[in-house]
Amino acid sequence: GENVEQHPSTLSVQEGDSAVIKCTYSDSASNYFPWYKQELGKGPQLIIDIRSNVGEKKDQRIAVTLNKTAKHFSLHITETQPEDSAVYFCAASTSDNNDMRFGAGTRLTVKP
Amino acid sequence: DVKVTQSSRYLVKRTGEKVFLECVQDMDHENMFWYRQDPGLGLRLIYFSYDVKMKEKGDIPEGYSVSREKKERFSLILESASTNQTSMYLCASSSPGRNTEAFFGQGTRLTVV
């Protein structure tokens, strides 16, 4: 089955700096790669996703890149703000089934 | 506004008890999932369901079972709770088709003593 690895496990940045979180996956059939943000006391919420037919997607300060050859994808947050502090999860799934596998999570802290 | 509701935020149960975790979604989603969240391990899939009365094992089904008698409700059952099942449990649902967003409940923090 699919195995997703995520790094780093914790990340601390100064407000205004950029943050990058990286994930690798094992199943070459995976073609959907969402990123979820989990704030304290809440369930994860989708913030951005990318499908295998594109290499990059951007939504305001958030961008995701995908390298299918190397089987890795990354989340980039620019101009970080304290409200970006949360746990971020990457995930991967195939089109044959809808069960999603998640990475271990990254705790991002943005210092004012 | 889409909603996935888990019946309890916090539960404390004794070892050996039978435990039911309930999840209800109001989005008419076909797919429902149970995950377990532990520090450093992320979200691990326990069971999922694509339709009423249908269930599939995830990566860590041992010690758990599920029930889906109605489309909107997906229950996770711990037949005989053990201390190593102390964890945060998250329910999610998604719409029919492939590669679609999963909506999560707020989670149930279960402590087995």
Image (spheres, grey):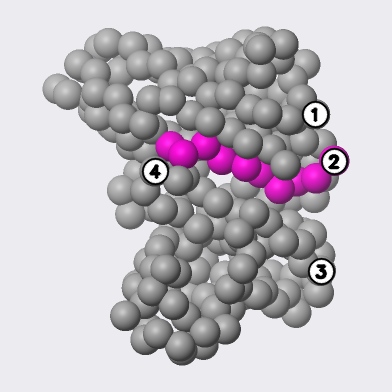
Q: What x and y, as percent, mark residue A20?
A: 41, 16
User: Considering the numbered disc 1 on the image, is that residue within a helix, a strand or a loop?
Assistant: loop
Q: Count neighbours of disc 2 (C-alpha within 10 A) and say few if under 14, some if 14 to 19, many if 20 or more.
A: few
Q: Which residue is under mark 3?
A: B54
Marks 1/4 in contact by CB < 8 Å: the verdict is no
Q: Which residue is under mark 2?
A: A96
Q: Does residue B16 show up magenta in the picture?
A: no
Mark sitting earlier along the chain (4/3): 4
Q: Residue at x 77, y 25 (%)?
A: A28
Q: Residue at x 45, y 69 (%)?
A: B85
Q: What x and y, as percent, mark residue A83?
A: 28, 31
Chain under callout 2: A
Q: Which segment did they paint magenta?
A: A96-105
Above or below residue A12? Residue A46 is below
Q: What x and y, as percent, mark residue B40?
A: 39, 43
Above or below residue B28? Residue A104 is above
Q: Which residue is under mark 4?
A: B40
Q: Count neighbours of disc 4 (C-alpha within 10 A) and say few if under 14, some if 14 to 19, many if 20 or more.
A: few
Query: From where the camera sits, is residue A13 visible?
Result: yes
Q: Name the front one of labels 2 and 4.
A: 4
> Quarter of the image holding residue B8?
bottom left
Q: Count neighbours of disc 1 (C-alpha within 10 A) and say few if under 14, some if 14 to 19, many if 20 or more.
A: some
Marks 2/1 in contact by CB < 8 Å: the verdict is yes
Above or below residue B89? Residue A1 is above
Question: How far apart are labels 2 and 1 at the CA level?
Answer: 9 Å
Q: Which mark is residue A29?
A: 1
Residue kind at label 4, given as amino acid type = Gly
